[in-house]
Amino acid sequence: MSNNRREFIKKGALLIAATPLIGMNGCSKDKEINKCTTSDDILGPYYRESAPFRADLNVNNQLGTLLTLSGTVYGVDCETPLSEAIIDVWHADHTGDYDNSSADYAFRGKINTDSNGRYEFITIVPGQYLLGGGSDYRPGHIHFKITASNHNDLVTQLYFAGDPFISSDPWASQEDAAERTVTLAVDSNGNKTGIFNIRLTPS
Ligand SMILES: [Fe+2]
């Protein structure tokens, strides 16, 4: 190898080393880690600890619009997928009621991300429900609790674009909830699909 060629490779390596690692959403590994962190939301009153691991949450074949939700969990650098993360989800049925006591744990379940950091579960579109017995409805939403080694737990909620109750909801109307408000695609059978990618912070 010529000296010129050797020098070129050496400089190239230095240039790569000096370049910040730019991840999804343009975030920098070094300085702007928070920009690629999925924002949190309230746990709410209906979380149950011991939901089973499963990908189909509609165990009783209840009424509702079929929803397939999928995504990828990313870690510290905004772009490395996290395998073996645990995604714990829970939501109301199509009328807005939660299963708070039965052994079925309807519309509740945990899923492990695969080797590519992906998860997918099948459920129904949750209904809206009255907030605290008042006259204000919460928009339809799905609760998430995500845990992964070496990362902070994340408790958050997913909302659906076009829901008329988002603007009046104290949580869904917050600015950072916009990144957690997904547009659902509808197929010819009326079934819906959505994608929710999640980014965790290192612990
Ligand atoms: Fe809720």
Image: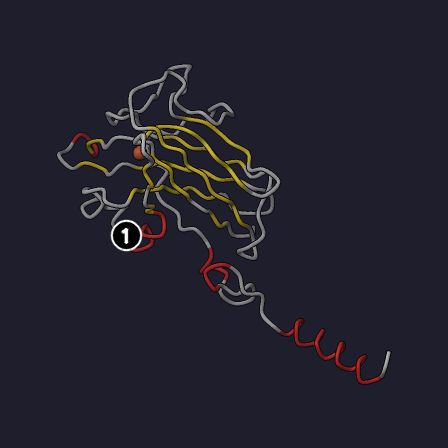
Given residues 189 and 177, the one toward you in this image is 189
Residue assigned mark 1: 174
Residue found at the very far front of the displayed protein: 188
| Helix, strand or loop status at disc 1 | loop
Q: Where is residue 58 drawn, in percent x and y? A: 39, 22
Query: Residue 194: horizontal and vertical position, in percent?
Result: 38, 40
Q: Quadrant of residue 1?
A: bottom right
Displayed-image quarter of ligand 1: top left
Q: Amino acid at mark 1?
A: Gln
* Left/right of residue 62 with respect to residue 32 in the rendered view: left
Q: Nearer the viewer, residue 31 or 123?
A: 123
Question: In the drawing, does residue 97 fall left or right of residue 14?
Answer: left
Q: Is residue 7 above or below residue 100?
A: below
Residue in the image at 27% along x and 45% along y: 161
**Residue most extreme to the bottom:** 4
Image point (85%, 82%), residue name: 2
Q: Is residue 60 left or right of residue 171?
A: right
